[in-house]
Amino acid sequence: MWHTGYGIEINLSLPDLGHPGRPDLLREITARVSDRDPQLLECLAHHDGRECLSETGGKSPWMFIRRGRLGGRRPLVASHLPITHRATPAESAQHKATKERIVETAGRYGLDAEAEIPMANRRSVSDAVVTGPDGRRIGWEIQYHHLSPSSVHRRSANAVEHGITPLWVAKDRTASLIDRAPWARVDDMPWKDIADGKEMVIRGGYRHLEVWKCVPSGVRHCLLSEGAGHCGAVHADWFVPALCLPRKKPVHIEDLVLQSATGQSVPVYVPSRGNGRAGRHMWVSAADRALWEEIVGEETPLPAAPVEEDDDVVTFAEQEIDRTCRAGDDSWSANDARPLRDLDQPTGGCTLPRLPPPRSCDPIRITPVERAAASAALGCPPWELGLCDGCNQLMRRHGRNAAMYCRVCRAVLNGR
């Protein structure tokens, strides 16, 4: 392509784009079109006075850069403007019906809901915003066609910046929004079925926490052993409802409308084991998230920055520049089939140390500082503190709604 500002040719197959003296060139040309001159990048054939297939087809000779997918590589691809997906009538009807169903469901539950809500900075619009009794706002984004990961992150970050928790809805297991923001996947249904209230199950994006002790009599596999062994430790992992033991009831879109707005269901992000750059976004019950945070010993906030996965890293073939316009030529589109992103497998979970056998411990040996810190952390008076009968950790052991075992030990004992 031709850079009209600098008057130079750009070769997207080279790491330095053919201009080693311009280290910021890649950042400049991959900026959003709205943040730069739309005529900054020009089809090289058009610039040379040769036939531009896009222009002769009644479209634009001006270009932008996207990230392609070809044989496991992620090359940079020059595309003509406009390339934005135009929703088909069927997609538009599905989108509208889903949005109206969310708003109507919220109204039936007595929740405030509005459609097509612009952000204060006007940079994006939520399809529907549902407000809970405590002021919690959920921004529903119905995305039934492909959207780039960078757009998903930008719009999600913009929503969070304005106090809105994003909730993306997809119908395709290959949707790039999956695990890049809080999401839910529904079936690909005719718009009339959606409008008529046909059962709309959340097929992906909602999970339940299961905790189990890894013993021979257990019904789950060991997370640490590749064979059939059992390590004796306590494992915790997230499962879709159909893979829970016992099987959980499916979650419907009406359930998520209510529970997300009231805080009964909340988003959580679980980094992948062995790969801190990737992870799973999911909706879970508030109780499951609290138990998970107790197990891992920390809160799990949503990532504030996009996570670059291995298959997102740009690759360069280092070839001679192609001076021919390839607009409309599918063989040059660098668009392999997108991989499945909504997978039913567990996340990889977490393994706790072996629980120590119950033993007597003198509460008098707990120092005043430890007792004060535990009291503040657990939100109870110091005199209600005691030791868990399972792991000897300080917990709310006495008083109203107290228990003999902490939540983690209770989960293990109950075979969760």
Image: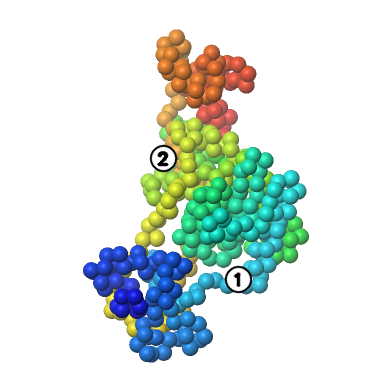
In the rendering, at what x and y percent does residue 209 appear? 55, 39
Outermost residue toward the front? Answer: 121
Image mark for residue 87: 1
Q: Identify the residue at horizontal 47%, vertical 21% (top origin).
A: 374
State the separation of the CA atoms marked 2 and 1.
Answer: 46 Å
| Rendered image: mark on residue 344 | none
Give the label, 2 or 1, closer to the camera. Answer: 1
Image quadrant assignment for residue 141: bottom right
Residue 106, x across and y down, in percent: 71, 49
Front residue (pair 233, 330): 330
**Residue 4 appears left or right of 157:** left
Packing grade of label 2 (10 A; few <14, some 14-19, many >=20) is: some
In depth, the one of 285 and 102 nearer the eye is 102
Label 2: state its secondary structure.
Answer: loop
- Name the foreground residue: 402 vs 148: 148
Image position of 217 (left or right of 127): left
Q: Are marks 2 and 1 in contact (CB under 8 Å)?
A: no
